Every structure is written in structure tokens, then in C-alpha cells.
Amino acid sequence: MAFLADALSRVKPSATIAVTQKARELKNAGRDVIGLGAGEPDFDTPDNIKNAAVEAIRRGETKYPPVSGIAPLREAIARKFKRENNLDYRPEQTIVGTGGKQILFNAFMATLNPGDEVIIPRPYWVSYPEMVAICGGTSTFADTSIDNGFKLTADVLEKAITPKTKWLLMNSPSNPSGAAYTEAELRALADVLLKHPHVWTLTDDMYEHLTYGDFVFKTIAEVEPKLYERTLTMNGVSKAYAMTGWRIGYAAGPVALIKAMDMIQGQQTSGACTIAQWASVEALNGPQDFIAKNKAIFQGRRDLVVSMLNQARGITCPSPEGAFYVYPSCAQLIGKTTKAGKVIDTDETFCSELLDAEGVAVVFGSAFGLGPNFRISYATSEALLEEACTRIQRFTASLT
């Protein structure tokens, strides 16, 4: 009898965490490494949010919280959805988890039976299919391409739906591509979903506030109210509020689903950190003006990276609508050879050789289900981004 669970054989380690850890180890060994793998803002948490946490500690808010979240935070979440997304949720329709990952995991655990399918557009965040596998479901992948901006189209969605489909998992803006869906694009997908009432939608809106230019963010239950009763709308404070380490995610949906997720969480972790929850109350209710300032900085970084990568030999880099990632193609470099005689046969090899030769750590696209591409996080300083892109230009120019 094997000691470890069979489910582990279906799960792969996180490539993004692995790249970040390798970059950290090389730095500790004395290498000059620029890590562009981490998916977190380099800004500090705003002072008013940190002060709210300190005040909560001083008030003695240090006991076990309710499993689904403290009442003031669930109320703040309901107000946020009404204020920003025109969605009416009661506090009892919301749930707070230890980061967005737990929200997703609990939703799948509460709903998936063996054989149930989850449609995941690719490229996808590396954890999506692994969560589905752990929870006993089956991931079915709907392909996008660089030509359509890495977005799921209505015809592809229609072909992907089967009688076993339980969820469509949407992420807009997307990790890893930065692609964000317009209202018209969501409308087309909603029209397909209306024809298949057995399919629910789980929408990961974690990068909602990080969109650029004139882009207007919409979420699918807002675009099509008829999908409200079979949509779980997930979000969190990590990205927009620079609170990745506080580990607070949240969602809203039908009461029966929220209660099922609450039951699972009650046997798993119970409520999320009380101090972080009080900080999140301030994040959602407090001043929001810093978000626009951070967005402007991110947009400048995006434009710098896109411009410099498109000047690199053999690299094609579209300009994404949101998040803080670019997802360039290195297809033209497959088959090239490094100075050391190594053949670039995959995007993983490209990224490995780039790290060895130039000390730039990026994540290979095949880890996100679609290559030959690679993901760069531009959540770091312009100076480091410019230096990293210069190194990438030098590396690609050296290939023969």
C-alpha cells in the first residue's frame, strides 16, 4: 500500500514558485539575477490599511473569527460589488478565505464529483488545473492564441461544453497573458452559456483594478444578470491593494454554494486571519485614490517592456489590457543555438538558457498550457525592467 495519496500523482509543482525560488537561490549564491517571475506588486501596503491592522490588535481583535468572515468585512464586500460591479449581494452571499486560492479550492471541493469537467481557457494560471485534479474533477482546455489576444471566443466555448461540464473558469484580466475581456466579448460568451443551463461560471477577477488606457472592466454576472444564480464571482485584496502577504480572498454567489464552501472551510482552516480581515475592511471602505496612481506606474512599465521586447530578435510581444504580465512568443527562436551549443528546442529551454546566460528569471509558457511563450511580471522597478529587457535583447541576438 502506497503511503502518499494517489491524487498527488495528478498534481504538478507550481512553476511560478519554482522560478522565484531558483532566482532567490542564485542570488544567495552571489549571481546577479533579475527575477521577473513573482506575481505580486512591489508597492508597500498603504499606511491606512496597516494602521487598521494595528488598531485591530490594540482592540483585542485576536480571537477566532466566524468561518465565512467577520461581519464588517462581509458587509464591505457586498458594498464593493454593488459600488464597482453593479451586483446585488447580501452579506450572507459572501465568503472570505485565506487568499483567492482557498476560495477557488473550496468552490471546486464543494461541487466537483469524479468525471465532472471544468473548462479552462489556456494559457491559464498554473494552479487552476491542479486544483481541479486534487478535487477529483477533469480539466478541459479551451485554446486561445496570440492572434485573438489570448481570449476565449464563443465558438471555441461552444465546442468545449459537454454534458459533463460543471464550470467555466474565467480570469480577466488574465494571469499569465494580461488579456481582459470587453463587455461585448463577455456578452458573446454569456449567450453561449445561456444555452447550457448546467454550466456554472467561476470568474477570477483578482486583477480587476489593474486595467489600462480606456479599458472598462466588466464581470460576466454584471453583463448578463440571467447568469447571476449560477456564477461565483471571486476577488481579493492582494493585487490592487498590495496585500499579497495578508492572504485575503473573497467571493459572492448563491447562498447554497456559499454555505457548502463554509462547511468545507470550517473543517479545513476555519476563518481567515482576523487582523488581516480588519485590514481588508479598511482596504475596501477606505480611500481608493492610490489605485489610479499605481495603475499609471504599471502602465508605464508595461509600455516599456512591450516596446523593448518587440525590439528583441525573434520575440513578438502583444500589449495586454491588464494585470502586470506580458506573454511574449519566442516561436521564432525555436531551433536556434546558444553560444554554448545548446539547441533551443522548447520555451522551457529558452527560459533556462536565458537564466544561465544573462541572469534573467522568467516563467516558461508551457507551464501555463500554451507555448512557445514565456511570462514576464513587470511588477518591479523600471530600472530593473530596462536592464532585464536589455539582457533579453542581448541573449536573443546571440542565438544562431
Image (cartoon, rainbow, N blue to C red):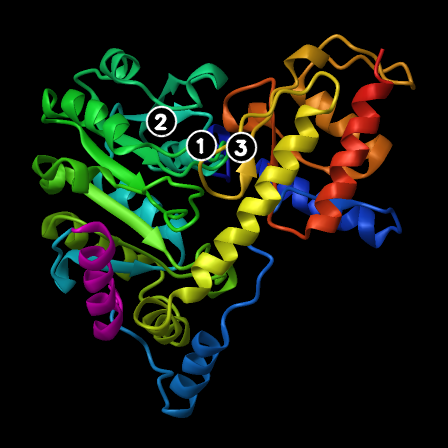
Q: Is residue 331 left or right of residue 203?
A: right
Mark 1, secondary structure of its residue: helix
> Where residue 12 is drawn, which disc sits there?
3
Q: In this view, does 396 lie to the left or right of 320?
A: right
In this view of the protein, which residue sits in the foreground, 75 or 134?
A: 75
Distance (Cα) linking label 2 and label 1: 23 Å
In this view of the protein, which residue sits in the foreground, 220 or 8?
A: 220
Mark 3, secondary structure of its residue: loop
User: What amino acid type should be assigned to the residue bearing mark 2?
Assistant: Ile
Q: Which of marks 2 and 3 is nearer the N terminus?
A: 3
In this view of the protein, which residue sits in the foreground, 215 or 241?
A: 215
Q: In this view, does 25 lie to the left or right of 152?
A: right
Q: Which of marks 2 and 1 is in front?
A: 2
Residue 40 makes an appearance in the image: no
Q: Position of residue 217 (x, y in %)?
A: 31, 42
Residue beneath label 1, please? Answer: 6
Mark 2, secondary structure of its residue: strand
> Where residue 120 is drawn, which disc sits there?
2
Q: Quadrant of residue 169?
A: top left
Q: Where is residue 111 in the image (x, y as percent from the top left)?
A: 21, 39
Q: Where is residue 72 in the image (x, y as percent from the top left)?
A: 23, 74
Instruction: Magenta stretch: give its range.
Output: 67-86
Q: Earlier in the sequence, mark 2 or mark 1?
A: 1
Q: Is residue 158 magenta?
A: no
Viewport quadrant of the C terminus = top right
